[in-house]
Image (tube, rainbow, N blue to C red):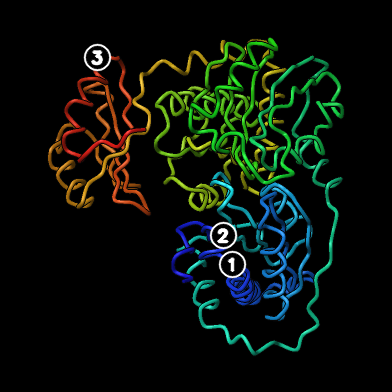
Amino acid sequence: MLGKVFKAYDVRGTYPDPLNEQMAWQIGVGCAKYLLGDAEKAGESTPMMRHLVVGHDMRTSSPSLRDALCQGIIDAGGSVIDVGMVDTPFVYFAINHLDCAGGVQVTASHNPPQYNGFKVSKRKAKPVGESTGLDQVRKFAATVDQNSKETGTGHAEPRDLWDSYTKHVLHSLDLGGKSIKIVVDASNGMAGTMVPKVFGKKGANIDGLEIVELYFDNSKGEFVHEPNPLVPSNLRDLQEKVLDEKAHLGICFDGDADRLMVVDERGQIVGCDHLSAFLAGWFLDKHPGASIVYDLRSSKALEEEIRSKGGTPIRSRVGHVFMKQIMSEHNCVFGGELSGHFYFQSNFNADSGAIALATVLTALAQAGKPMSELIDPFRRFPQSGERNFEVDDKDAALEDLQAHFDGRGAIDELDGVTIDCFDNEGWWCNVRKSNTEPLLRLNVEARTDMKLSEILDEITPMLGQPVAH
């Protein structure tokens, strides 16, 4: 049964079948054994190295799964710092703030309410994915003897860290005396708790900030719309509200508030690669010559902006495991993913929806221009958006794709297959395999609409059956 809920980057499944309290207890044991052992191998001996941070989201199944998880951690000889109902980046903060061996957030992010799961982090809030420890957690959980318990002095204690977390987030916010009105769609998720606590009810904690609240009630663990801001239809209410309120911009968070999407003052959705380009320029003005990491599906406009500002652009595989690793290895000041994850050196190289909001507000205030005017220059290349194709043999399709375009441009396999003919033919594309489905995912960008249409006509017949999106 455990094999059904362990995914590439986290643990996730429907509640109570297959994911239930018994399984949560096993996973707690597995997390403790792996995370405490990992810290011990690293020679860590600080007072909090036997402690794990545990938080949970607003789903109705989260408290009982949290309790079972915590008991598993304790039974395996660890201690728990229970930070309560928080957004996922809060757990990343708490791990570093308290110097713990790691932590777990009980959440299913943007999935429907019948789902739940666990996001696991190790020391310094480094992500635990399939290749970075999650497989070991699964093995420990699968082989645990339910009748054996260590005789340690492990315990669980609640800890309220909201004041410290608020100071940490607001360190990135400076409106410089400007007045900004925004609409925030919390998606009935954890932003409904985080935003009022950090920024104040309707922005009351911040001089000059007015927040119009949309779908902030998370008391029932249900969603008015799917808590996934990447789906355009989920942004319609936000777009309308921005126009009705004549707001400077709109923000939509996902379920656990680690991702966000921006809508400009015209109600137009801002692509996360375009937003990353704007923020990259802002960061490079403050940190000349710094490195910026971005996921390889991003617009060429982002790479060009980083270079034009004197920075070093670094392409990354898709996924927070890879983004955070590059943030650390290359001392990057900022990173952005097409999915709405934004990473900050000042946040232990981790992603944060709250700090992303604070940074966007600060950069907007300092620019003194409408968001649309700031973003429009980065919309200069037509994009296909991500398109999915169903195919039986994904590897064979990728091999055929490489053979077809061999000699026409640069080809690499950093993540799937990227074919770059931008300089000679005016287009590039990336095709990646889905981790969980028989799908290939295509992203194409071109210099002109005509070239985009031409290359889509050439590539799509090679990838299988298009899936409606």
First in sequence: mark 3 vs mark 1? 1
Q: Residues within 10 Å of mark 2 (few under 14, many from 20)?
A: some
For the point 61% across and 74% down, which residue is it? 22
Q: In this orientation, which residue lies closer to the viewer: 125 or 109? A: 109
Q: Quadrant of the C terminus?
A: top left
Instruction: From the image, tell me which residue sits under label 1.
Output: 20
> Compared with residue 439, is residue 129 higher up or lower down, i.e. above or below?
below
Mark 3 or mark 1, which is nearer to you? 1
Name the element at disc 1.
loop
Disc 1 + disc 2, Cβ < 8 Å:
yes
> Compared with residue 415, is residue 37 higher up or lower down, i.e. above or below?
below
First in sequence: mark 2 vs mark 3? 2
Name the element at disc 3.
helix
Instruction: From the image, tell me which residue sits under label 3.
Output: 450
First in sequence: mark 1 vs mark 2? 2
39 lies left or right of 379: right
Q: CA distance from mark 2 to mark 3?
A: 48 Å
Disc 3 + disc 1, Cβ < 8 Å:
no
Q: Amino acid at mark 3?
A: Met
Instruction: From the image, tell me which residue sits under label 2.
Output: 15
Name the element at disc 2.
loop
Q: Amino acid at mark 2?
A: Tyr
